[in-house]
Amino acid sequence: MTAAQCNAQGLHRYSFNGCYKSTNVMLSVPLEKWYGTLGYSLNSNQGRYVYRRDLVDYDPHNPAGVPWEKIYQTHSRSRTWQAGVTRTFNIRDINLTSSLNAFIRNESAFNAQDKGIFITLSFSGSRNDVGGKRRSFSGGASWQASKQGNTQLGYNAAYSQYSDESGENETGISLNGVNTDNVTSSVYGRMGGQYGTGSLTLSDAWDRTTSGHILNSSAITAHH
């Protein structure tokens, strides 16, 4: 089903109900201590506006221009096959998951087939101390490279601590980023007691393109 406005360029919108269709199928099979996966994805887009900076570098239909210029993309269709292996194991109560995947993508908007691989590694764990204190941590990294795209490294880490068994008194910190282009970090605290609850979050987002920081803070209180 496709909406009537999908190809209406004058509306300058990114998408409408019915303009984008996506079908995904994934099969997983155990292989000794690993799991093998095979996936297929079919995506169809009826037309939309995108910023030039969101276009991939190998698009032959649009010459160089300012990154904030809006480009109208007509109907496109892409097919992607993906295969990989995944393994999850435990070391000293730390859960580790690793995966290696390869993909082949054909897209009607471009005249070149894209092939690539991506590797992911993640970990998580928790510790319980005397007195009800609980600590948890998690993190991960993913690396992706393709024939037509840029190499990309993503990473994240998080840590939180509960000071008692109530689950209402918590402090934590998190960090995530992509290459050295974008890095976001945050610190938060949450407290609860007889008279109410409150939380405070401080975050900072850094963008290498603008060499600027965006600071945010939020506070929430509730009384019983």
Image (cartoon, rainbow, N blue to C red):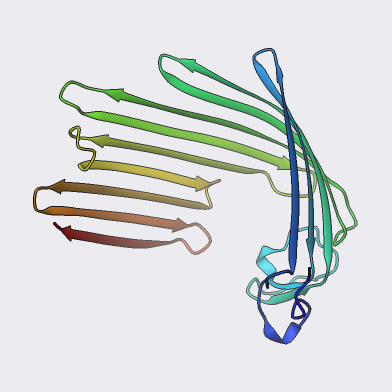
- Tell me: 68 left or right of 218: right
| Quadrant in which residue 136 is drawn | top left
Closer to the camera, 111 or 63?
A: 111
Q: Is residue 106 above or below residue 122?
A: below
How many marks do you count on the picture?
A: 0
Going 76% across and 51% down the picture, which residue do you hit? 23
- Tell me: 142 left or right of 16: left
Closer to the camera, 207 or 177?
A: 177
- Where's residue 214, x and y in %? 39, 63
Q: Residue furthest right?
A: 111
Going 77% across and 39% down the picture, which residue do you hit? 116
| Quadrant in which residue 39 is drawn | top right
Q: Residue furthest left?
A: 194
Going 37% across and 43% down the picture, which residue do you hit? 174
- Where's residue 161, x and y in %? 26, 35
In the rendered image, the quadrant that contains the C terminus is bottom left
| Quadrant in which residue 170 is drawn | top left
Closer to the camera, 92 or 33?
A: 33
- Tell me: 130 left or right of 147: left
Going 80% across and 58% down the picture, which residue do you hit? 58
- Where's residue 143, x and y in %? 62, 37
Closer to the camera, 205 or 189?
A: 189
In the rendered image, the quadrant that contains the N terminus is bottom right
- Where's residue 206, x and y in %? 43, 56
